[in-house]
Every structure is written in C-alpha cells, then in structure tokens.
Image (cartoon, coloured by chain):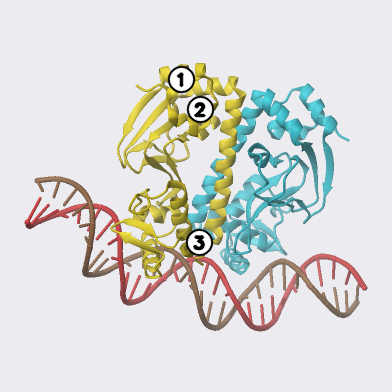
Chain colours: A cyan, B yellow, C brown, D red
Amino acid sequence: MGKCEQCIIKQFNSLKTLSEEELIRISSCKTSRIIKKGDIIFEEGDTLKGIYCIREGICKLTKLSSNGKDQIIKLVVKGELIGQRSLVSDESVNLSAIALNDMEVCFIPKTEILADLQKNTAFTFDVLKEMAMDLKEADDIIVNMAQKSVRQRLAETLIYINDNFGTKPDGTLSVLLSREDFANIIGTATESTIRVLSQFKKEDLITTIGKQIKIIDLDGLSRVE
Amino acid sequence: MGKCEQCIIKQFNSLKTLSEEELIRISSCKTSRIIKKGDIIFEEGDTLKGIYCIREGICKLTKLSSNGKDQIIKLVVKGELIGQRSLVSDESVNLSAIALNDMEVCFIPKTEILADLQKNTAFTFDVLKEMAMDLKEADDIIVNMAQKSVRQRLAETLIYINDNFGTKPDGTLSVLLSREDFANIIGTATESTIRVLSQFKKEDLITTIGKQIKIIDLDGLSRVE
DNA sequence: TTATGAATATGATAATTATCATATTTCTTT
DNA sequence: AAAGAAATATGATAATTATCATATTCATAA
C-alpha cells in the first residue's frame, strides 16, 4: 500500500501541513478502498469512524429533501478530503457521498486525525481555512438558488464544471453527469434541465454527444439571463 | 468599559475557551461600539481589521445577488461572533452585516485573535466547530431553497425564528422583520411573502398585529405543504 | 443480436411565482 | 393633528417551472 508521506495527493488538502512523522503514523493505520461508480461511500446519518482522502475519481455529496428528492451540495474530486465536518462536530454525517465514477479513497481513522487536531495548530488552522472556504461557497450557492432562474443556474453549473474540472481531449466536460444529476445540482425537475439544455443547443451555446456536453460559447453561457 | 473576562456574553461563543490571561489581553485592546437600527456594521467587500462580538441586539448577514436583490443568509443575535470567516480566510468579507435593532458590539482586533488561533488549540478547535455547524446549517438552507415552495420556506422561517429567538410577552415573534426582510430570507418577491402571510392568516396559522406576527398554530405551520 | 430497461427528449397542461398597478394602512416628521 | 413617505395589502396578468404523458435513443445483458 502507498505511503502518505510520499503521496502527491496530500498537496491538495490539509494533510500537507502535517509533519513527516505525523504522516508516517497516519500511513501505518490508513486503509485504501476501491469504490465503483454509483457506490455509496457513506450515507446521511452514518456515524463515520474517520475521514476519507480521495486518491482517484469524483463523487457527489447529496442531501435528501423531505419531498424525497436528492439535492447535490458539492462535487468532490481527487485530492480533497470528505467527512471532516462531521468529525469536527462529532455528529453523524449530514450528507451522503456517492461515487460518480470508479474511485480510490484512503480511509484515515478518526483517532489519528483528532490527535493531530489537538497537537498541530497549523493543521487545525488549515482545516479551519478549508471549512471557511466551503462556507463561503455555500453562501454563494444559497444566493444563486434563491435569486437566479433555472436557466442561469444551469449555465453557471456548466461553467463551474468546465472551470474546475476541465474537459476531455474532444472538448466535452470531463465530469460526466446524468441529466438527473444536473437537475439535482440546480434544484429543478429533470425535464426542465433537459429542456434548458435543448434551448442552449438551439442557441449554439453547447453541443451534446450522447449525454456528453461540450461548451462551445463559454462567454455566451456566462451572459445567460 | 466592560471587561471581557467578566462578560457573560462570551459563554455563548468560542471566546469561552480562552484563558483568563488571554481574555484580559483582549479586553485591553477591544473597543465597544453602539450601532443603530439599520446601520451597517460592515459591508460585502470590506477588509475587516478584526471580529465583532455581539453584546446586544440582532443583525442580518446579507449578500447582494447579481440581479440587485439582497439575500439574507443568517440572523445573528447577542452572544455570537461575526467576521471570523473572513479573518480565517484572510479575505474581504463576503457578507454585509446590518443591524435589525439597536446594537452594542465589541470589536476585537485581528492580531489578537490570530495570536490566540496560533497558540490556543482549544480555541482554534472551537472556532472550527462553530464553523462546521454554520456549514451544516448552510447545507440545510441550500436544500430548502432548492426543493421547497415559497409557502413551505416561509412557514419554516417563522418556525425557525420562533424556536431560536422566541416571542414577546404578547406572543408575537421577538425578532421584528419587515415583509421585505422575510422575502429576502426565503428568496422571493415581497408581494409573494405578503400574499402567503395573508393565506396563513386565513388558515388561522398566524395572526398579525401591524407588522408583528404571532404564531397561533405551530403544529399546523410545520405541516404546511 | 435482439430485447429490455433506463435515460433522454418533447408536447400539453397545470401550478407556482413574479411583475406591475393600485389601494390602504402605518409610521415619521413637522 | 396633518402631510408625506414608506410599508403592507390585493388584484390582474405574465413568466417560470412542474407534472404527466409519450416518444425516442441509448446501454447492457441474456
């Protein structure tokens, strides 16, 4: 199994602030896990015994609404940690994590992380910093949900995915989501999402190849009203 | 001026984890400020030189949407801190803070708080814990915004205010908001808010005395669909 | 390969919410 | 106490979005 202290992934998250020594200790008790597309890493209400560091793949963090629909709160990719919030609050997780493609994740037991949170101020502060960023992003999402149309939210979601996760060689978005997933991100009915995508096609803002989406006018998309 | 180490307010926020010594140091450089109803404590984009501890009164945290409407992200009352997020991220504030009634706040310079964040792990961890709670609440708001009707969101907002901030002796909600404020919390037009409040009145879920609102059927409100 | 189910697509219609107009009430100031 | 401004209230109508029905395409396994 790989060693944390040599893992490049840690550069992208708070684990980078840990000392060589601390990383070796974590490495010795971490476990690696392969997760298939569609599989659940953890589910809303679960009591997590640690956090996950994503080595490969992408997953969605969702929350079930009382009307029975899932809301996607965040897409999480290679390099990021998940499960920190519930670890810090010492509560059950408030979100489910579901793989969008095949993944490899490392599980780090709660006790190890808590030990570092108690001793290493730089680590705690970095986790705090990341959470402050998440909170800021959440504020932005709230405003978008509250104030923008489905059309605008879909346009912004496409831009977000393009800017943050990039495209494949053929120009299609590298994160492949179903129309239903898009609907669950922007908080609308699947049919509405499909309809707006069709509009965007007619307006030459995007093209589609099967379920793949290719942005052909990023500027136009950003000006959607 | 009051002394932090003797201030009861600190029990309700992360400052409670500071030592007597640390509190005395903070006390010596804090400044107290009286803020009138409607006044701005800080504005989106400002660079804060510290954080505020609310000794008295209530304020709203708002964010301006690109369509020109304000969204209220959170109501903050006596005992809570504001400005921590931007201090931690070392960024300009992403929200504006506006007094909903006359307030008294204490301003604590950034350097003092950062010093404690560097030395006192318990303090850092408590700030982290609070932020994890804020993040969880933000997730809930996202789901509500995305999945629930204006009617449901207004009902839940009334319940939230009742449960968290209580009522006056006459039974009306102790936090007095304009209809426009309500609209800016639930993300709808002011007229829609007024219309739904009228419906709630007809359904005997609430009564109104001027702009004051009194919940008369909490159970019914919680079952609104 | 074909059959079978799932995902995507589109039409028709209903429900929700926004917008604009206009009263009416309440608050503030003089 | 009266005037003017601001907030609340309600009607009429338009715009947005959801829902239900039904094709059509796509993917996957027998």
Is the Cβ of the residue at disc 2 closer than 8 Å to that at disc 1?
Answer: yes
Report the amino acid beneath label 2: Leu
Marked residue chain, label 1: B
Marked residue chain, label 3: B
Residue pointed to by mark 2: B15
Residue drawn at point x = 57 percent, y = 51 percent:
B140
First-in-chain label (3 vs 2): 2
User: Is disc 3 placed on a helix, strand or loop?
Assistant: helix
Q: Nearer the viewer, mark 3 or mark 1?
A: 3
Report the amino acid beneath label 3: Ser
Q: Residues within 10 Å of mark 1 (few under 14, many from 20)?
A: many
Q: Which mark is residue B222?
A: 3
Q: Quadrant of the N terminus of chain A?
A: top right
User: Is disc 2 placed on a helix, strand or loop?
Assistant: helix
Measured Cα–Cα span from mark 3 to mark 1 = 43 Å
**Residue B127 seen in the current view:** yes
User: Is disc 1 placed on a helix, strand or loop?
Assistant: helix
**Residue B48 seen in the current view:** no
Residue drawn at point x = 60 percent, y = 33 percent:
A128
Marked residue chain, label 2: B
Left or right: residue A115 compared with residue B197: right
Question: From the viewer's perspective, is residue B29 above or below residue A106?
Answer: above
Measured Cα–Cα span from mark 2 to mark 1 = 10 Å
Q: Which mark is residue B26?
A: 1
